[in-house]
Amino acid sequence: MHCCSHIILLFGQAICTVGDNCYRAVTFLKEGMLVWILFLLCQVGAPALAQDLCQRDAPNGYKVRISLKTALGEDAYEWNQSEMFFFQATMAFAMRRHFQMETYNVDNIILCVQTSRVSFWFVVTSPDNTTMLIPKADVEKAVRMSRHRINNAFLLSDRTLEFLGIYPTLAATVNPDTPPWLIVFGVVIGAVCAGIIALLVSSLLQKRRKEKGMTEDGQDEEDMQVKGVENGINLDGTYNRGFTDDDRFTKL
Amino acid sequence: MGKDAARAEWDNPMQFVLACVSYAVGLGNVWRFPYLCQMHGGGGFLIPYMLMLVLLGVPLFYMELAIGQKMRLGSIGAWRAISPYLGGVGMASVVTSMYLCLYYNVINAWSFWYLFHSFQSILPWAECPANSNLTGPVEECERATPTQYFFYRETLDISGSIEENGGIHMGQALCLLLAWIIVYLFIVKGVKSTGKVVYFTATFPYLVLIIYLIRGVTLHGAINGVKYMFTPKMEQLAKPTTWINAATQIFFSLGLGFGSLIAFASYNQYNNNFEKQAIVVSMVNSGTSIFASIVTFSIYGFKATFNYESCLERVRLLLLNTFDLAEDTISLENVNHWIAELNRTHPEQFASLGGRLETCDLEAELDTAVEGTGLAFIVYSEAIKNMPVSQLWSVLYFIMLLLLGMGSMLGNVIAVITPLSDLKFISHYMSTKTLNGLVCLFCLLLGLGFTTRSGNYWFTMFNDYGATFSLLFIVLIEVITVCYIYGIKRFEKDVEDMLGHRLNWYWKIMLAGVSPILLIALFIFYIVNYIQGGTPTYQAWNKELGKSVVTEYPPYAQAFIGLLLASSVCCIPLTALYTYCKKRNLASGKRERTVSTITPRQS
């Protein structure tokens, strides 16, 4: 709007220099109309100027693509002017967050080339000078910094709210101290080794028991069994040797 | 029969049958048969397969069981008893089994690796890891697929060719150690422990297969795969390779010639009815192949449909983004309609799409036939990661692979240990446990070579050449020996002694006539194929391209292939020569003869 006030002032100055006394009453009406016409022209001209800054393939602009149906399916909201305004506000917030000193406003974010895909281009102007655009790299830094907040504002993700040209930073792979597979491995190999040791020890003990029974030959167990003593209880009758557990010949 | 009373035995005939089933039903049923089915005309392949089963598989299986049960010795002792000059056949079997033991357990190590990695919230082969800058995925992973990246880079850490060696992959080495410890646990007490283990290893895979069948056929798009498999393409039957592949598959699937069947049967009761058991096991093996291929094809169908729909989705997005249309104008169904429409209305813009527009073809997706480790570890894991609750399915699947592999491994190891423990000088010095431990340790140490960076290439070499050609030769010599050198009449008498009834005309015709002819034909075909094939090649993984390229083996690797083939085959003529010389010396030296009659033999 600054340009309009400049133009009106200049024109007013030009008019005042023309006539002094006689024309003042007549020209007053004409001035009013001219100012009004100029005002109207400025209203049209200002967006036209802004439109020159924001266009398809603008050197300092980014294209944004939104996929609402993919992200939200049935719950997708309608993309309308209010949502566009929300986008401008979010971008202004992102710019403010990055450049902490400067106060960006909704007017500093200019949108254009809207399509039904939902995609559009935007450029960011400087708060001090509306004809000056913020360079692409700075806009990228601001977007990267607040990407998560921007996504969440629209209930979208990196994939469904795309800034073409700004690649999302992938989440760093979590590297735990012990890889989980090693834990499972440890459990399994522990169980298996325990099984083997148990088997070997049990067969060793069995062999020792058999050897003791064989070499002592009639002492201890066999002797006790012959005398009819089992578990310390004196049984009547004699023990039939034919049923002793002598499996010497059926070893592997 | 004093010696025989000391020999261990199966607790009951069921254990023997389950051991044979566990051995025969292995990874080949899951990853080789579905591939062959697909390559050779789907349902039509069953015809040559069944025919070869009847003509070749069952008679040879019967013969090996008969030999083992009659001789009650491992392969070396059994063949020496049949014909002293052909004891080398047993030796060749042992050498081949040894090669198999060395490399087969590496597959179990990979199954363990995948199994342990399934206990994570996101399966590690589902997504590409981010690169160091966190700007995108790792390039190798981007050019290939995440499942391929996980297999070639994180599991194998594969080098670019067989010449580039590298260090041992510690994770793989640990998994191999675990695999060998478990094998030792299963065989430590001989058939007493093995007999109990096979109850589990033979039956549990079927449970998992049934669960997978139910899961598989209920997947979206599975019906495409099953339909594709069962539509027979009868023209494939006219090609000779179909019949040859059917014969080869039957042959290797039943595990003939390794000496495992002889070893298993040697622990049988003398009068065990192996005839019925032979038929049962062969039928179960083939039935399992067909059953597993239904499961595989339903998974294929799911994967192909998933890829096809992803392709359509990508094309849809591309069209939406290029022409800035609203999201709901193009849906997956009318993508093709819109392509034609947009080509008509906006030709220049459409032309600017250029190569980015993919053609999505379901048939092409189904046509990608894969076999072997590629099927089991890449294609299947890709399908699993897209299923809901993928961790559960992954765990189940790799447990099934493990059981199948372990069951076959048992047979392989027993084929090596039984003849060794039958040898007098070994059984005199050490107990069964020590022998088993030593064999496992030896195989583990040599098997560590397959866990190096170029280890997978050596694995493929062993897989392709270690047991294929030598087995055909061994079994051919076996059949000729039994039928013509030992004599079909003597064999008939032995069988009558064991079973109580004479050999059927079917067995006589097959063993004496049809099987040897088929084997000779297979043998000749193999030799011709090998000579015509030129320099042997292998698939080397190229990091930059993100796919496998066909590379020729270097000269020393080709020499090694020749060594692999020769080392088992030449056992037969060498032993025959040795026995001949020994007999000549014995005959010529009277003094030796007198000494030999006086010196007490330990047999």
Image (cartoon, grey):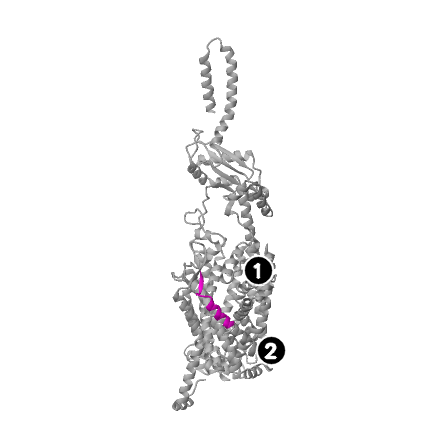
What x and y, as percent, mark residue B241? 54, 67
What x and y, as percent, mark residue B8? 50, 78
Asked if marks 2 and 1 fall on the same chain, the answer is yes
Host chain of mark 1:
B
Kindly identify the amino acid type of the residue bearing the numbered disc 1. Phe
Query: In the image, is residue B283 above or below residue B588?
Result: above
Q: Which mark is residue B297?
A: 1
Specify the farthest residue to the top: A22
Q: Which residues are magenta?
A: B522-539
Would residue B425 appear left or right of B330 to someone viewing this image? Answer: left
Q: CA distance from mark 2 to mark 1?
A: 35 Å
Label 2: state its secondary structure: helix
Residue B524 visible, this angle: yes
Residue ID for mark 2 = B506
Magenta span includes B536: yes
Query: In the image, is residue B469 above or below residue B130?
Result: below
Q: Which mark is residue A16?
A: none
Would residue B526 appear left or right of B238 to someone viewing this image? Answer: left
Q: How many marks?
A: 2
